[in-house]
C-alpha cells in the first residue's frame, strides 16, 4: 500500500508555556521548542505499521519552510521511506483551504492508496484531512483510532466518538483518514536514527512545480485570517494558596476536609 | 444577509443540548437572523426530534432517508448539499460528528470554514469576527472569516446559552435527501468497557495529567488517593500513553463525572477535559505552570510541581489520621 502522511511542525506544548507576544500579533516564538504535531506522529506510526503488515511505502509531506525539514527527517528516522517539502513564499498566509489545496496538488503528483493526517493540531482547526478528502473526492473518516487492512479494496476503521465509544465503519480505498492519538504507541526516535537519514535528499516543490496559482493559495486566497492573539479570561479564577509548601499543604487539607474530600 | 442554518445532532429521538445553543450562537452573529434547523434521520425518532426543535426554530427542514438512520458524515454531507443554498451559513456543534462533517462540507459548498468557535464578536460587511482558542486554551485569537460565499461553522458545545423560551412554534418542512450513495458505510458502535472502578460514581476524584511526566510517578497519585479515600482518574494523555485504562479518562472523549471534590493534578484544563466534569464540584488545581487554563476554572489553585508537592500532601494527610 502506498501511504502518504501529512505532517506539521508545531510548538511543542509539553516543552513550552505558550505566551502572547508584547503587541499581540503572535505567540512569543523566541526560544520555543518545536516538534512534529503529536497527532501526526501517531499517523506516521500507523502508516509504518500498515506498511510492515502489507508492504508498500510511506511518504511524509509537509507544507513549511527549511526548518520543517527536521520534522520530515524525524519521521523518516521512525521508518518513513520518503519525505517531500512543499515550500514557497506564495504559500504564506494560506488558510486551511489553501494548505489543503497545496497538499492536494502534491497528492496528485503521486499514486497513493491511503492518505493520513493527524486529527488536529494544538494551533489548528482539525480541518485539513476533511478538506483534502473533499477536494480529491475521496471518502473520509476522522478521529480514527483503529484500522484493519485485511482487505485491499476497503478498510475497516474505528472512530473515537463521545463517551469513549467507538464507531466502526467500512471505507473504500483510496481514502483519507485523520488519526486520533492513542491508536498506537509511536516508536522512540534516537539521535542515531536521525543521523542515519541526515543526508537523504528531500525534494522540495514550490507553487509552480505544483501548478498552483495565487487564486488558490496564500494570503490572497484566504477567507479566514487570524487577527491577533490574546490571553483568555475564562472565569473568576481560582483562589491561589500562597506560602511555604508546608503552609499550602495545611491549608489544602483544611479545605478538603471542609468539602468532604478526605474520608 | 445570508441564510442561516443549524444542523441538529440527535440521539434516540431527543435533540442534543447543542440544538438549543446553536440558535443563540447564530443570533450572536446576526440578531435578526431567522435560523432554519436541519434534522436528518429516519423513522419515528426523526419525527420526534423535528417536532421538538420546531419549538425553538421558526423553520425546520426534515430530511428523512433510511441511509440517514445513523449519522454517517459522508451520507449527511450529500443530503445537505442536495438541499442547501449556495450562500448558506451553517452552524453545527464542534463534536466528533461536526469534526467529521464540517471541513469537507465547506469545500463542497465553496464556503469559508471556521471550527470550534468560542464566541462571535460582530459582523463587518461580509466578515464575521470570531474568538477561538489555541494550544489547549493557553491563548485565544480573534479570527476574521469572510462569509460572502457562505460559511460552515462548528461551535464549541456549552459556551452559548441554550434557548429556553421554546416559543418559536416553527413549521416542519419535508425535504428530499436526494442521492446519498457513499463510499463509507457505518457498521456499528462499540460501547466502551466499564473498568474495575466506576469513576462516574466517585465522590472524590484524584485526577492526573501530563504533569506526572512518567509512568513510575503514578505511584504518588495512587498513594494520595488511598490516603484520601478517593478514586484515581486522569486526562487524555495518560490514556494515550497507556498508563491508565480508558475507563479512568475524564472528558468529552472519555467519561462524564459528577464528584463533590475534584483534584486536578498536572492537568492543563483543556475544554475537552473540563467538559467531562459536571455537577459543579469543588475543584483544586495543582500545576507548576501559573498560566495553565485550569487556574481560571478551579476554585482553589496551588502553583507547585506535583512531583514534589503530592508526596508531602499524602504524608501530611496520613500523619493527621
Image (cartoon, coloured by chain):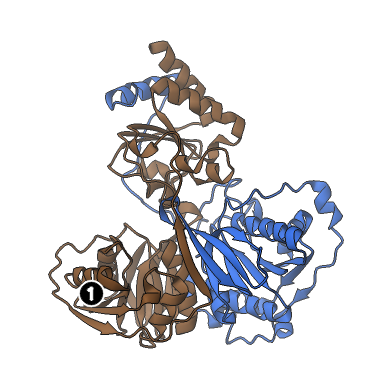
Chain colours: A blue, B brown
Q: Is residue B206 or residue A216 the one in the foreground?
A: B206
Q: Is residue A247 above or below residue B215?
A: above
**In the rendering, at what x and y percent does residue A159 appear?**
51, 60
Vertical arrangement, residue B317 with respect to residue A98, above or below: above
Q: Does dot 1 land on a helix, a strand or a loop?
A: loop
Q: Is residue B276 left or right of residue B267?
A: left
Residue A146 drawn at (x, y percent): 58, 57
Q: Position of residue A89 (x, y in %)?
A: 67, 76
Asked whether the viewer can see residue B142, the reply is no
Given residues B81 and A106, the one toward you in this image is B81
Residue A241 drawn at (x, y percent) = 38, 29
Q: Quadrant where the C terminus of chain A lies? A: top left
Note whether residue B144 is visible.
yes
Residue B206: quadrant of the picture: top left
Q: Quadrant of the N terminus of chain A?
A: bottom right
Q: Residues within 10 Å of mark 1 (few under 14, many from 20)?
A: few
- Between B202 and B309, the residue placed more toward the observer is B202
Q: Residue at x 36, y 46 (%)?
A: B256
Q: Is residue A166 above or below residue A59?
A: above
Point 65% across, 51% down: residue? A33
The foreground one among B267 and B143 is B267
Question: Residue A150 is drawn in which quadrant?
Answer: bottom right
Q: Please identify the quarter of the rendering in which residue A90 is found.
A: bottom right
Label 1 chain ID: B
Residue at (37%, 25%) from the top-left corner?
A: A252
Name the residue tied to disc 1.
B31
Q: How many marks?
A: 1
Amino acid at each position: 500500500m502506498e501511504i502518504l502522511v501529512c505532517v506539521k511542525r508545531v510548538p511543542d506544548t509539553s516543552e513550552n508555556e505558550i505566551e502572547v507576544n508584547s503587541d499581540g500579533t503572535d505567540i512569543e516564538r523566541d526560544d520555543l521548542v518545536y516538534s512534529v504535531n503529536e497527532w501526526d506522529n501517531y499517523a506516521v506510526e500507523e502508516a509504518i505499521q500498515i506498511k510492515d503488515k502489507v508492504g508498500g511505502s510511506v511518504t511524509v509531506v509537509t507544507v513549511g519552510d527549511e526548518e520543517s525539514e527536521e520534522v520530515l527527517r524525524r519521521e523518516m528516522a521512525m521508518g518513513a521511506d520518503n519525505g517531500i517539502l512543499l515550500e514557497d513564499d506564495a504559500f504564506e498566509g494560506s488558510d486551511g483551504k489553501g494548505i489543503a489545496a497545496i497538499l492536494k496538488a502534491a497528492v496528485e503528483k503521486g499514486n497513493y492508496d491511503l492518505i493520513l493526517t493527524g486529527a488536529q493540531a494544538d494551533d489548528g482547526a482539525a480541518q485539513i484531512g476533511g478538506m483534502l478528502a473533499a477536494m480529491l473526492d475521496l471518502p473520509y473518516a476522522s478521529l480514527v483510532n483503529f484500522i484493519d487492512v485485511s482487505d485491499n479494496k476497503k478498510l475497516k476503521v474505528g472512530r473515537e466518538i463521545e463517551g469513549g465509544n467507538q464507531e466502526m465503519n467500512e471505507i473504500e480505498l483510496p481514502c483519507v483518514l485523520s488519526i486520533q492519538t492513542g491508536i498506537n504507541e509511536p516508536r522512540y526516535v534516537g539521535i542515531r536514527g536521525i543521523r542515519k537519514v541526515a543526508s537523504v535528499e528531500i525534494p522540495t516543490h514550490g507553487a509552480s512545480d505544483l501548478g498552483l496559482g495565487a487564486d488558490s493559495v496564500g494570503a490572497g486566497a484566504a477567507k479566514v485570517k487570524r487577527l491577533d492573539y490574546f490571553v483568555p479570561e475564562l472565569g473568576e479564577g481560582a483562589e491561589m494558596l500562597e506560602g511555604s509548601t508546608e503552609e499550602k499543604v495545611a491549608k489544602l487539607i483544611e479545605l478538603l476536609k471542609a468539602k468532604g474530600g478526605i474520608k | 444577509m445570508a441564510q442561516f442554518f443549524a444542523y441538529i445532532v440527535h440521539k434516540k429521538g431527543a435533540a442534543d443540548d447543542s440544538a438549543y445553543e446553536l440558535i443563540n450562537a447564530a443570533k450572536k452573529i446576526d440578531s435578526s437572523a431567522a435560523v432554519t434547523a436541519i434534522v436528518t434521520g429516519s423513522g419515528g425518532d426523526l419525527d420526534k426530534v423535528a417536532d421538538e426543535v420546531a419549538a425553538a426554530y421558526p423553520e425546520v427542514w426534515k430530511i428523512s432517508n433510511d441511509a440517514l438512520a445513523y449519522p454517517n458524515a459522508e451520507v449527511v454531507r450529500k443530503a445537505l448539499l442536495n438541499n442547501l443554498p449556495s450562500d448558506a451559513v451553517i452552524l453545527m456543534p464542534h463534536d466528533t460528528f461536526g469534526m467529521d462533517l464540517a471541513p469537507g462540507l465547506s469545500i463542497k459548498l465553496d464556503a469559508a470554514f471556521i471550527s470550534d468557535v468560542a464566541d462571535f464578536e460582530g459582523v463587518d460587511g461580509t466578515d464575521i469576527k470570531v474568538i477561538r482558542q489555541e494550544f489547549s486554551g493557553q491563548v485565544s485569537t480573534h479570527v476574521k472569516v469572510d462569509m460572502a460565499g457562505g460559511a460552515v461553522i462548528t461551535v464549541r458545545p456549552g459556551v452559548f446559552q441554550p434557548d429556553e423560551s421554546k416559543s418559536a412554534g416553527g413549521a416542519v418542512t419535508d425535504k428530499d435527501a436526494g442521492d446519498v450513495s457513499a463510499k463509507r458505510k457505518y457498521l456499528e458502535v462499540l460501547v466502551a468497557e466499564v473498568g474495575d472502578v466506576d469513576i462516574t460514581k466517585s465522590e472524590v476524584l484524584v485526577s492526573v495529567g501530563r504533569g506526572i511526566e512518567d509512568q513510575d510517578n503514578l505511584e504518588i497519585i495512587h498513594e494520595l488517593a488511598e490516603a484520601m479515600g478517593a478514586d484515581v482518574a486522569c486526562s487524555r494523555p495518560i490514556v494515550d500513553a497507556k498508563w491508565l485504562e480508558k475507563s479512568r479518562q475524564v472528558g468529552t472523549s472519555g467519561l462524564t463525572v459528577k464528584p463533590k471534590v475534584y483534584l486536578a493534578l498536572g492537568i492543563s484544563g483543556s475544554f475537552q477535559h473540563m467538559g467531562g466534569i459536571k455537577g459543579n464540584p469543588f475543584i483544586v488545581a495543582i500545576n507548576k505552570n501559573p498560566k495553565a487554563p485550569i487556574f481560571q476554572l478551579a476554585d482553589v489553585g496551588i502553583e507547585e510541581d506535583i512531583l514534589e508537592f503530592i508526596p508531602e500532601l499524602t504524608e501530611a494527610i496520613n500523619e493527621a489520621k
